Image (cartoon, grey):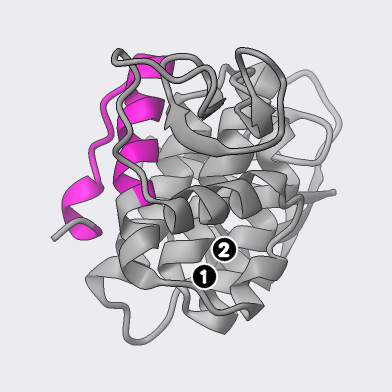
Amino acid sequence: MQVIILSISTYKEKDAVISAISENEFITFLARGINGPKSKNLAINNALTIADIELMDGNFKYPVLKSSKQLFTPMRLEMDSKYLGSLLLMNEITNYLFPDEEKPKLFKALGEGITLLKKKNDWLMTLLLFFATAIREGGFELEVNKCVRCEGKNRIVAFSFEEGGFICEKCVDEEVNRDLTKNQMILLRKIFNARDFALLDTDYDKEDAEVLLRRLISFMEEAFGYHFKNLRLILD
């Protein structure tokens, strides 16, 4: 079974209780002796490792790890604060914004996100695309293709996080905060219409992306009712 490791908690002296997601389920299992220096499973003893695991059958408090093979590790010899912070934030979103039964919804995006972050090293767009997936999977679909008030598609002039989408010139009023530029709204539309990480191979304005990142962080904290712990690593 292919899984992404989410958390590792020491149990007794050398054992650990590991939480992970597969494509279909959230699982917690016991890895005996994994904290020992000669453990054959030592390679999966890091959060966000992608691994192929096999569990023992039996009447245990937790399923017990029988064997494992590391398929991917996001760890690098040199990791700057943006890279490390991005990993921590994607893991934090998966662990704390979603109940256990819904965590597998992020399996594909999390796997692609950490893999392409290591390959492309574009932390900013990686986070924006992962945020968009998390917001959609969390039930907060944002309308980026038409006005949320009249459903018109022309003369879009604002985006309202409170109302959840674009607002056109005909519908906008003084209560709508017009604080995103045209280019920022275009980039926001691209991000939320994307269903993969292909935007990592396109050019985009970094300043516009950073503005959107901060706005999405504020929106997610309010929508999910959770305050992120690792923002200091990515926000200057």
Q: Nearer the viewer, residue 178 or 206?
A: 178
Q: Residues within 10 Å of mark 2 (few under 14, many from 20)?
A: many
Does 47 appear above or below 70? above
Magenta region's main secondary structure? helix
Q: Residue at x 68, y 50 (%)?
A: 109
Q: Is residue 227 left or right of residue 51?
A: left
Residue 150 position by quadrant? top right
Q: Residue furthest front?
A: 170
Indicate which disc, 1 or 2, sits on the residue closer to the N terminus.
Answer: 1
User: Could you say where residue 144 lies in the image, as x and y percent from the top left?
Assistant: 63, 36
Q: Is residue 19 left or right of residue 111?
A: left
Q: Which residues are magenta?
A: 212-234
Instruction: Kindly identify which residue carries mark 2.
Output: 114
Q: Residue at x 67, y 37 (%)?
A: 154
Does 226 appear above or below 19? above
Q: Secondary structure at mark 1?
A: loop
